[in-house]
Amino acid sequence: MTFLRGWTPRERHAVIASYLGWSLDAFDYFVLVFVLSDVAQTFRVDIIRVALALTLTLAFRPLGAFIFGRLADRYGRRPVLMINIACYSLFGFLTAFSPSLTAFLVLRSLFGVAMGGVWGIGASLAFETIARDKRGFVSGLMQSGYATGYLAASLVFGFLYAWLGWRGMFVAGIVPAFFLIFYIWSQVSEAPGWNLERARASTTFSVLKSHWQLALFAIVMMTAFNFFSHGTQDLYPTFLQKQHHFDHATVSTIAILYNIAAIVGGLTVGSLSQRFGRKRAAVATALVAVPVAFLWAFSSTAALLGLGAVLMQFIVQGVWGVIPAHLNEISPEGARGTFPGTVYQLGNLIASVNAVLQTAIAERTGGDYAIALAGVAIVSSLVIALFMALGPQAQDVEMVELKP
């Protein structure tokens, strides 16, 4: 990451660790979206029953966000982040050895608990370490880790699936995860925004109780954000396979292209939010999704669908590129390890019905995924624009007094 030259080593290592932690987490999640059909065939069930695994993963993420977030507020960001990465990697690995659909669903639920903690802890580690003028860029970079994980899953699916099979896809993330844990242990310092005295002086429950209105607003807003991301990502490969009958190579190519666009979108809009404000950047970007949704969902050729997917994921991750900084900035002091991740993942809990909902709509409309995809994308983008416009902004709020 040569673009981090000129930063202090402490800043650089914290940002790299947070980015990679979220990237590997996303990889382990998105592997499943490419192999829903294969898992269903292995266990001789309908796709909708396997899609329940996506719902369960999302539904259990708030529990992990709260548990690991509280531990991070109490014991520090760095040690809890290492434990958290080890947990999600282990459960992702064990998924490969599921003997039945029930075991598969249980393991994806446990993976969801572990997945839920990483985003909030990584964000607090990064934003409590870096200088304020770097938050916009780092926000986009960190959120781009999600698309990076999706891109990695796309590449593995495109180039290694024939050799690995669906079970081998879940094994692939274990080795880089252990290298990342070693990197954090050897190179990353604790966030200067956390200290033991402050952790002992306040409790997460008391902080959240006194800011319940902000928490409720943020949960509803993050529900729309999660519908926007999962509603445009989770079933899109299945849509391309089942409705348009594209082969693995075509699906993988489109997924690679739209994930590259997603990374660029997160970096671009996140950086622009430092100049124009978090709210303005998010609202303007979200509204562009409305016209793009028709190209993205209702085109008939691979070229037009690919173009629509590239534009849509640039927008989706562009809007999301504002969120890591925005949620950390509006978070109450003393609960920054818990608040952002918990409201984010509670939004995920509500939006966890998305995969099953979209699959059910498609099956009831004769296998037409386009209606379900476009409907969720348009509604969620409008709700995001409304809530971001009406909500608070605390750009550049002081999180820690950085020393030269």
Image (cartoon, helix red, strand yellow):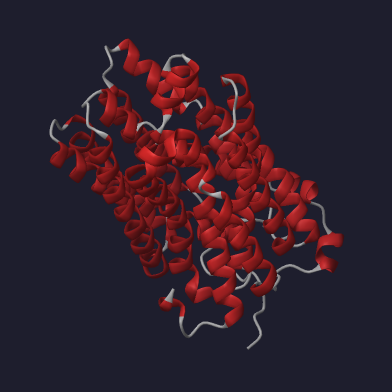
Residue with the most extreme front position: 163
Q: Is residue 211 above or below residue 357?
A: below
Q: Residue at x 58, y 50 (%)?
A: 174
Q: Residue at x 44, y 63 (%)?
A: 141
Can see residue 322?
Answer: no
Q: Which image quadrant for residue 194? A: bottom right
Q: Nearer the viewer, residue 271 or 46?
A: 46
Left or right position of 311 against 59: left
Query: The C terminus lies in which quarter of the figure?
Result: bottom right
Q: Position of residue 253 (x, y in %)?
A: 25, 45
Left or right position of 208 against 120: right
Q: Position of residue 273 (x, y in %)?
A: 40, 64
Q: Which image quadrant for residue 12? A: bottom right
Left or right position of 332 against 243: right
Q: Nearer the viewer, residue 116 or 100?
A: 100
Query: The N terminus lies in which quarter of the figure?
Result: bottom left
Q: Position of residue 329 (x, y in %)?
A: 57, 61
Left or right position of 248 against 73: left
Q: Across the whole image, how many numbered discs are drawn on residues?
A: 0
Q: Is residue 11 above or below residue 293?
A: below
Q: Residue at x 40, y 62 (%)?
A: 270
Can see residue 109?
Answer: yes
Q: Residue at x 54, y 36 (%)?
A: 348
Q: Nearer the viewer, residue 136 or 314?
A: 314
